[in-house]
Structures are given as structure tokens and as C-alpha cells.
Amino acid sequence: MHPSITRRHMLKLAAGTAAAATLQSLSAFAQASPGSLSSRRPSVQDRKFHSPAVETYLSNMRPRIGDPELAWLFENCYPNTLDTTVEMGTFEGKPDTAVITGDIPAMWLRDSSAQVWPYLELASKDPALRRMFEGIIRRQARCILIDPYANAFMADLDAPALEWSRTDATEIKRGVGERKWELDSLCYPIRLAYGYWRATGDTAPFDQTWRAAMKLAVETMRVQQRKDGPGPYHFQRTSKTPTETLPGDGYGNPVRPVGLIASGFRPSDDACIFPFLVPSNLFAVTALGHLSKMAHEILHDDALANDASALAAEVSSALHQYAIAPTPEGTIWAYEVDGFGSQLLMDDANVPSLLGLPYLESSPDATLYARTRSFVWSDRNPWFFKGSAAEGIGGPHEGKDMIWPMAITVYALTSRSQVEIARSLSMLKRTSAGSGFMHESFNRNDATKFTRSWFAWANSLFGELIATVAEKHPTLLSHT
């Protein structure tokens, strides 16, 4: 062995060779029949938003992806949010941006934040992108001030709620699309705001309206610790699907107030069984830490900064006391708990998930996460499916045997194994089923049986994965 080549370096070379072999061997089987690999993007004049930086990035990425089908998927998926979902405007003379989720004409606080996340690193190079981000941050603040318990808002804030929400037994305010209380709906706007600030240094969006929205977000989280009762939020819906409504007169199942934050619904928009949703509480710890830093350094509001950091510390302590579950293979994070001792062991495809904790910078214990990851990506997780088309995590939202491409993408984004990443890329190619895009879910044995042909979050996340692999593991993309 050459003295300058260490054992670790040899192992890395071996891993890279194995990953390339995996990608190549799976590639033949993974080839969907896409017909023509012509662009599936809208014509230039029909695109909702144009970013010179994004177009330059796409051009620069093209020669770095050796697999023509993977390159085709990336060029369709990466700009899909900008091409099809962004609605720019102004409000009181300042940027105002609505980002719909895709085939549903409403803006989810979670989805809109996640959909534009891959463009953050380009924002410093593109004034148009910065204006778009500023508009989203401002719009999200307005939405939170309308109702901090709502998960979705209409692109036109003067429009009535989504049709299926109009008879819900809850208080629907003008501009609200749906009112499912999901803790992560308050965390994602904080994540986006923090990411934008770190990427650009711009503090223009962080005015008194944003400060008021952030104060309300923290207050809402504290109320939902339920130390003084269940709080004002309740929700019931007439539906044949039990996950569409909350038990207990609309307040959810009982909890013991131990410091965790209750959530009515999961990021899938499905009702929680036990209201302390663990991945969302872990995400809240991260988001509150980011908010504390911004409150201190940008707003010079030490009261808000201290309140956010104190709540984060309380939730973190409670998580370690109540959210860790024993299994024969060692302790793991539970998915949901109630503070009385009940724990639900599973994972769902939607992020925040247990699988996606490192992606959200919300995994405080690497060893605990490793055991949890092993659990959720196995048949010990009741919502893990494996078939002839692929393997991955689904959830109650689409039901048995339906895998979400989002879960496969997050599996790759949180993996340190080039073999796992290469295999994930091959599976994701199959799940497109020749459409040129990612979907909400697909049948484990037949990728042509999929839900939602226009789901911008899944497309953006796939684009982010390819961009990440190009940065960290470029050889995985250079092989044909």
C-alpha cells in the first residue's frame, strides 16, 4: 500500500466503487420508459417565476449528471416550484409571495417553506430570488397572525376556505384554507427565515409584523403544552376516514402536561393518536433555538429570545424523559407519546419524521438516531413497505402498500453510505414511472399506480437531493 493512502481512504475508495457498481447494476432494471426525454417544464412564457441564477445552475449541473434519465428528472423537478406554484405580488408596497402546494390551490406553511428551500444557496446571487423569499416570509407572518392554528391558507387571502374545510367544526377565519393544528406549521417558517438570513444577511423581512408573528408562534406553542387545560383549539370533521378528525370533542386524546407541545395533526395532515408528536417536538427545539438567535441579533428583543430558548430547553428535557422507547435492539425515539407512558412506535413519510431528523438538524443524539433509523427503515415499522418497485416508508394518509418518494429522498439525504444513496437514486428513477416528476406515493409493486402527478414539495426535495449529491458525492452522478 502506498504510504500516503490511509486505510480510511482505501475504505472510502472501496465504498465509492461499490456505490458506482450498485448504481450501474440497478440502472438497467430502474429504467422507466420515459419515451422522449424532452423537457416537461412549461414553456418559458408560461412559467410563474424566472430566476437567472436557477437557469444558470441548471446549465452548470447538466454535464455533471452522467445518467440521461436522472438529468432529465432533475431538470424537470428542481425548478418545478418556481415554474408552476409561485404567485408574486405586493402588499402595502412590499413583496408578497404565495406558493401553492401544486394541484391544491392553497399555501401550506410547511410545504411552501420546504418547496423553496433548495433555492436558498442561490439567493445571494439573484435579486429576483431574494424578493421572492422576502415575499414568502412576509406572507407567512401575515398568515400566522390570521390564525396560528391553521396549516393552510388560500393564495387569495380574501377567498373562502378549501371546499372540504367549510363545514369543519372549528373557527375558520377569512383566508384560512384548512385549520388542522400541526406544530411543524409554525416551525417551518422559522426554519425558512433563519435559512434566508444566514444565506443572504438580509434582514428586510424581519419587521414588526414578523416579530408579532413570532411572538404569537411561541405563545401558541406554550398554550399547547396544555399545562392549563387543552387550550382554545378544537377540530372535528364529518368523514368516513378517522384520521380526518380529532377525538375527545375535537381536542384529541388526553395528555399529561410534561413540557412537550401537543399537536392535533401530523405533517401528513392525519390526526395524531397521541398528541405529543416526537419528531415535531424535536424540530420545535431546533426552530426555537434559531428564533432565539434571530430575536437577539436582529430584533434586539431579549424577552422573545429568552422565551424561545427557555421553551426549547424545557421541550428538550421532556423529550429525553418521555419520548425514548425501549426495544429489543436498544432504545429509539418513539413517534408519538402522551406523557402518561403510552408510546407509538412507527414513522411516517412526511417531514418532520424520525427518519428526517438530521435533515432538519434536529437529531441531538447520533447513536439514538442510528438505532431509530434502523427501526423505521425495516418491517418493524408498520408503515414500511418493500416490493418489486422499491422499498420505503408510507403512512396512513395513502394507506397500505403505498410508498412515498419523499421518504426515499430523505433516506438518501440522511445517509452516509454511497451504496444507500446510489440505490435510492435508482429507486427514485423507477418511481417517476416515465412522468418526469416525483409523486406523492406509489404502489410498492407498481410505480405506475401513483397519487398526485403535481406535488411540488416532492419535486423540490428530489432536486435538493441531486444538488446535495453533486456537492458531496459527485462521482455518483458522473457514472452513466
Image: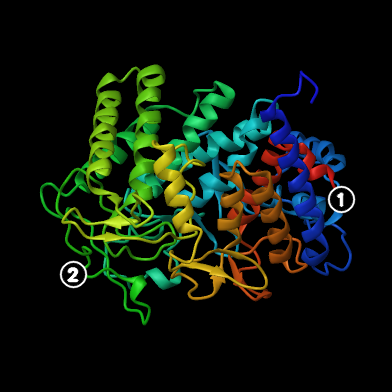
Q: Amino acid at mark 1?
A: Thr
Instruction: Residue 450: give x, y in percent of width and height.
Output: 63, 73
Instruction: Residue 260: give x, y in percent of width and height.
Output: 24, 46
Label 2 residue SS: loop
Instruction: Residue 97: give x, y in percent of width and height.
Output: 55, 43
**Crowd rating for badge 2 (residues with CA inside 10 Å; few <14, some 14–19, many 20+):** few
Q: Amino acid at mark 2?
A: Asp
The colour scheme of the drawn protein is rainbow
Residue 55: quadrant of the picture: top right
Q: Residue at x 51, y 54 (%)?
A: 155
Image position of 363 with respect to 207: above or below: below
Q: Residue furthest front?
A: 1
The residue wearing badge 2 is 249
Which is in the foreground here, disc 2 or disc 1?
A: 1
Label 1 residue SS: loop
Instruction: Residue 161: give x, y in percent of width and height.
Output: 42, 64
Residue 271: quadrant of the picture: bottom left
Image position of 21 with respect to 428: above or below: above
Q: Residue at x 35, y 41 (%)?
A: 284
The answer to whether residue 264 of the structure is visible from this angle is yes
Kindly report the distance in space between the C-alpha atoms of the residues bearing marks 2 and 1. Answer: 57 Å
Seen from the viewer's position, the closer of residues 330 and 436 is 330
Q: Quadrant of the N terminus?
A: top right
Seen from the viewer's position, the closer of residues 307 and 340 is 340
Image position of 166 with respect to 407: above or below: below
Q: Residue furthest bottom?
A: 240
Q: Which mark is residue 480?
A: 1
Residue 212: quadrant of the picture: top left
Indicate which disc, 2 or 1, sits on the residue closer to the N terminus: 2
The answer to whether residue 352 of the structure is visible from this angle is no
Image position of 392 with respect to 466: above or below: below
